[in-house]
Image: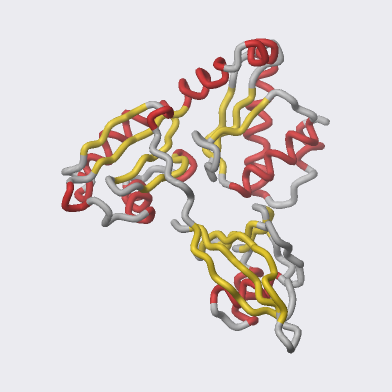
Amino acid sequence: MDKQELLKQFTKQEDKLLIAKIWDKLKFTTMKNKVQTTDFLDGYEQALVTKMIQLSKQNYYWLEGGYEEAQRKVLFFYPEKLQEVLQKEPKTKSEIIAQTIKVISIVLPQELQGKYNHSDYLGGIMKLGIKREKIGDIIVNQEGADIIVQKDMASYLQTQIQELTRFQKANITVKELEQLKIEQTKKEPMTILIPQMRLDVIVSEILHLSRNKANEIISQERVFVNYELKTKNAAMLKTGDTLTIRGKGKYEIGEIESQTAKGKLRLKIEKYSS
């Protein structure tokens, strides 16, 4: 399948632009026999490129975000000749990743530790004019945060973040991925009562909104199921699905715990903490 045929498989213009850009990286890898990487991709973008890769029948790639549960990931394309090396020497992959992804460690002064959340760190970075795709996951810990970035941005960001008022007293360093502080992903459990597993019903109950307001959010293209955009309010969800509502958070659909005498379902939901 050539580039133009591939692009016909995607309807939204912004999706076509992303796929065209990644296609060019794939072709560069094939022609030059060199590893190529993308910016950090969110879950929706990862779903898009996975579709692209399946259509183009590309086998030499991987997605990497720095740790197992990473939400934002870099796509690596590598030449066919590297496949045998990767199979014989698994550490080669780790070495390539280490040459591409670094961690900016922010350790706050003691009086500020535990007082900043994910939005405080991301908001500060956005004030610097840094595009979101240049930054991977931000992992908040008690002392501060670890920010996953690509190597070519690490030194610049280290200097720029130090200039922000809220971080002027912080100790900011660049470190390797192996030094990343990983804490278990926090999820906040909740239970909702619904008549059926329809998308608009679940969005309405999770956000404590009317059904009409929930449908507005869906029509605004802000709702994703398993990182795939959903615009039909009657779409049915199931246990294990990941529901993302832009501006409102990310949720995991749990088990139906029971059914009331009137036939309503008591559904368990877990909200990912930011």
Q: Position of residue 234 (x, y in %)?
A: 76, 72
Q: Is residue 210 left or right of residue 108?
A: right
Q: Quadrant of residue 155?
A: top left
Residue at image position (30%, 49%) is 142
Taking the image as shown, residue 26 lies to the left or right of residue 112, namely right
Q: 186 or 44, which lies in front? A: 186
Image position of 207 (left or right of 164)? right
Q: Is residue 79 above or below residue 156?
A: above
Residue that appears at 38% across and 53% down: 118
Q: Quadrant of residue 147?
A: top left
Q: Name the spot of residue 32 as percent of width and height, x first.
A: 64, 13
Residue sitting at x 46%, y 58%: 273
Residue 133 is situated, as x and y percent measured from the top left of the image, at 49, 42
Towards the viewer: 131 or 177: 177
Marks counted in the figure total 0
In the rendered image, the residue lying farthest to the bottom is: 262
Q: Quadrant of the C terminus?
A: bottom left
Q: Quadrant of residue 211?
A: bottom right
Closest to the observer: 130 or 137? 137
- The quadrant in which the N terminus is found is top right
Figure coloring: secondary structure
Report x, y in % for residue 190: 54, 70
Q: Give left or right: position of 59 versus 138.
A: right
Residue at point 76% right, 67% down?
A: 236
